[in-house]
Amino acid sequence: MADASGMPDVGEFLCFAVYSAGHAFNRVYKPLLDGVGLTYPQYLVMVALWSKDGQTVGELGDTLFLESSTLTPLLKRLEALGHVTRERDPADERQVRVRLTRAGTALRAKARDIPACILERTGLSVRELNRLQADISKLRDNLLKAQG
């Protein structure tokens, strides 16, 4: 409900609902990811590479909506953990390709049950979750488009 000035309560803001849901997700993911030795951003990088290995840093950044200045430290840490390698692309020295190591590929089996655990904890059906994900993705895309 809006106060006397007409400002809605923080709980009425869509952006706050998305923001606070993100925090709730992080709290649910943390113990699961601790079990595989990854942070949430590192996990997202690994999921992207499990889907398509050998991506450039730019491709990963586009997929994950991350700038190279944010992504590079994540990749360095994953490389230090032995999960990925980073190498200049021989066809284009300006590009750095990120590839899974054997350990990085093997980690997928350890992380296999995480999506099912998250689904269970949402209390939503697969259909509801898919619809919500599509709606939030559309919202994100609309906001990015409005930004120019």
Image (cartoon, rainbow, N blue to C red):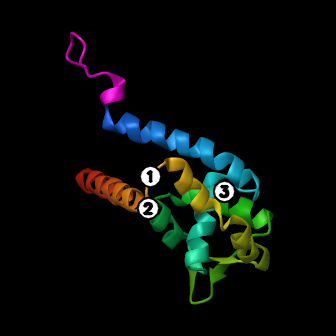
Residue 104 drawn at (x, y percent): 73, 73
Circle 3: element type? helix
Question: Which residue is found at the position 38% from the left and 57% from the top?
Answer: 133
Q: Is residue 26 magenta?
A: no
- CA distance separating discs 3 and 1: 34 Å
For residue 102, say whether it is visible.
yes
Q: Please give left or right for residue 91 compared with residue 101 in the image.
A: left
Residue 126 is tagged as 2
Given the image, on which type of amino acid does mark 2 rest?
Val
Q: Position of residue 32 (x, y in %)?
A: 69, 52
Name the secondary structure under disc 2: helix
User: Mostly what secondary structure, the magenta segment?
Assistant: loop
At label 1, which amino acid type do we have?
A: Leu
Q: Is residue 105 above or below residue 121?
A: below
Q: Is residue 95 something that shows in the picture?
A: no
Expressed as whole percent of the image width and height from the top left, the position of residue 66 reads 50, 58
Instruction: Say the numbered circle drawn on residue 29.
Output: none
Q: Position of residue 17 (x, y in %)?
A: 39, 37
Please report the bounds of the magenta region as a residue range: 1-12
- Density class for disc 1 (Cα within 10 Å; few <14, some 14-19, many ≥20) is few
Q: Which residue is mark 3?
A: 73
**Viewer-nearest residue: 35 or 46:** 35
Q: Are marks 1 and 2 in contact (CB under 8 Å)?
A: yes
Q: Find the distance from the CA under tag 1 to the CA under tag 2.
A: 7 Å
Residue 105, picture quadrant: bottom right
Above or below: residue 10 compared with residue 140:
above
* Residue of label 1: 124
Q: Are marks 3 and 1 in contact (CB under 8 Å)?
A: no
Residue 3 within the segment the image draws in magenta = yes
Do tag 2 and tag 3 residues touch (Cβ < 8 Å)?
A: no
